[in-house]
Amino acid sequence: MNSNKPGKPEKAEAKAQDSLQEKNLEKMEALLKHSAMGVHILFDNSSIAKVLRSAKDDKDFFDFNKMKKVQDSMTELIAKKTYFEKMDYLRDLDKESFEMLVRTYFHIVENTVRQTNDLNH
């Protein structure tokens, strides 16, 4: 057997991993759709208002280290299986990570709404 080619166990594991990622993305899409309609399941209104009230420089979104931190946080959040696990995870984040995650989440929601809006100029 050629050691460069994945065997059946590796293929099965890769297929299971792909399936899990697909399910996680479907869950994320559902959350985004709800948020686009104004139903914010993961974040309470006072937290959203508090985070989005303060102005932040957009270049924070382009800082590699911050982008990596937010990406890791978002990936971890999506990987949580239940609503309660997600809420526990959010509650345990440090303030900066939570704020960046909220800002990023709503940036994604805003872009999703813009992309699905048929009345673009």
Image: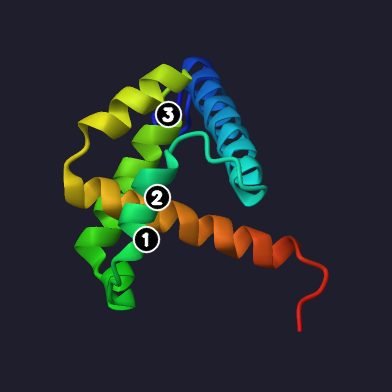
- Marks 2 and 3 sit apart, C-alpha to C-alpha, by 22 Å
Residue lying furthest front in this view? 46
Between 45 and 3, the one nearer to me in the picture: 45
Q: Position of residue 74 (x, y in %)?
A: 38, 43
Q: Is residue 50 left or right of residue 118?
A: left
To which quarter of the image does residue 42 belong?
top left
Between 89 and 64, the one nearer to me in the picture: 89
Task: Tell whether label 1 touches label 2 (CB within 8 Å).
Answer: yes
Residue pictured at 63% horizontal, 51% vertical? 36
User: On the image, numbered disc 1 is attached to which residue?
Assistant: 52
Q: Which part of the image, by quadrant, shows the C terminus?
A: bottom right
How dense is the environment of label 2, judged by Cα within 10 Å: few (below 14), some, or many (20 and up)?
some
How dense is the environment of label 3, judged by Cα within 10 Å: few (below 14), some, or many (20 and up)?
some
How dense is the environment of label 1, judged by Cα within 10 Å: few (below 14), some, or many (20 and up)?
some
**Amino acid type shown at disc 1:** Leu
Q: Position of residue 99 (x, y in %)?
A: 28, 52
Q: Is residue 104 above or below residue 16?
A: below
Between 61 and 10, the one nearer to me in the picture: 61
Q: Which mark is residue 6?
A: none
Question: Is residue 81 visible in this depiction of the protein?
Answer: no
Q: Secondary structure at mark 1?
A: helix
